[in-house]
């Protein structure tokens, strides 16, 4: 498993792009039996209105862009799963994450 600390992350949901605020966000890339899966864990996210909107929605699909703490750019598609009670969220990757 590879782990990358994220410095910035933005999502596009519907027609709106939002820069996510967080105290910690990490990208995990898991390789298992020839398959590569990825997901992002986000903690310390004060954007409760956004998290609540995802809780109430059936559409969790987002386009994302961002950068690792080392300056490596990332862009992909995933599904955002909110955890409003803990000011957190996970993004489960959908498909490849080019460059990783």
Image: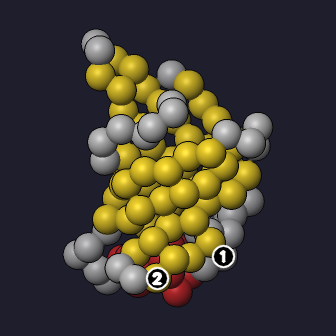
Q: Could you classify mark 1 by the number of other residues whose Cα lies within 10 Å: few (under 14), some (14-19), or many (20 or more)?
A: some
Q: Can residue 43 be seen from the camera position used here? A: no
Residue 43's image quarter?
bottom right
Name the residue at the left extreme: 58
Q: Position of residue 50 (x, y in %)?
A: 50, 81
Residue 30's image quarter?
top left
**Horizontal side, residue 36 vs residue 16: left or right:** left
- The residue at the point 23 percent across, 75 percent down is 58
- The residue at the point 45 percent across, 71 percent down is 12
**Horizontal side, residue 26 vs residue 58: left or right:** right
Q: Is residue 88 above or below residue 14?
A: above
- Pointer 2 residue: 16
**Horizontal side, residue 9 vs residue 30: left or right:** right
Q: CA distance from mark 2 to mark 1?
A: 18 Å
Number of the front mark, 2 or 1: 2
Q: Position of residue 86 (x, y in %)?
A: 57, 66
Q: Position of residue 65 (x, y in %)?
A: 54, 57
- The residue at the point 61 percent across, 54 percent down is 66
N-terminal of the pair, mark 2 or mark 1, is 2
**Horizontal side, residue 71 vs residue 31: left or right:** right
Name the residue at the top extreme: 33
Residue 46's image quarter?
bottom right
Where disc 2 sits, the SS reads strand
- The residue at the point 35 percent across, 79 percent down is 14
Where disc 1 sits, the SS reads loop
- Pointer 1 residue: 46
Q: Position of residue 83 (x, y in %)?
A: 47, 66
Q: Could you classify mark 2 by the number of other residues whose Cα lies within 10 Å: few (under 14), some (14-19), or many (20 or more)?
A: few
Mark seen at residue 10: none
Q: Is residue 48 above or below residue 69?
A: below
């Amino acid at each position: 498993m590879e782990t990358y600390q994220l410095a910035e992350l933005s999502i596009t949901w519907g027609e709106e792009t939002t820069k996510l605020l967080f105290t910690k966000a990490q990208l995990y890339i898991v390789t298992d039996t020839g398959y590569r899966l990825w997901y992002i864990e986000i903690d310390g996210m004060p954007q409760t209105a956004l998290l609540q909107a995802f809780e109430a929605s059936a559409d969790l699909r987002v386009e994302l862009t961002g950068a690792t703490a080392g300056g490596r750019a990332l862009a992909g598609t995933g599904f955002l799963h909110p955890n409003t009670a803990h000011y957190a969220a996970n993004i489960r990757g959908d498909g490849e994450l080019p460059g990783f």
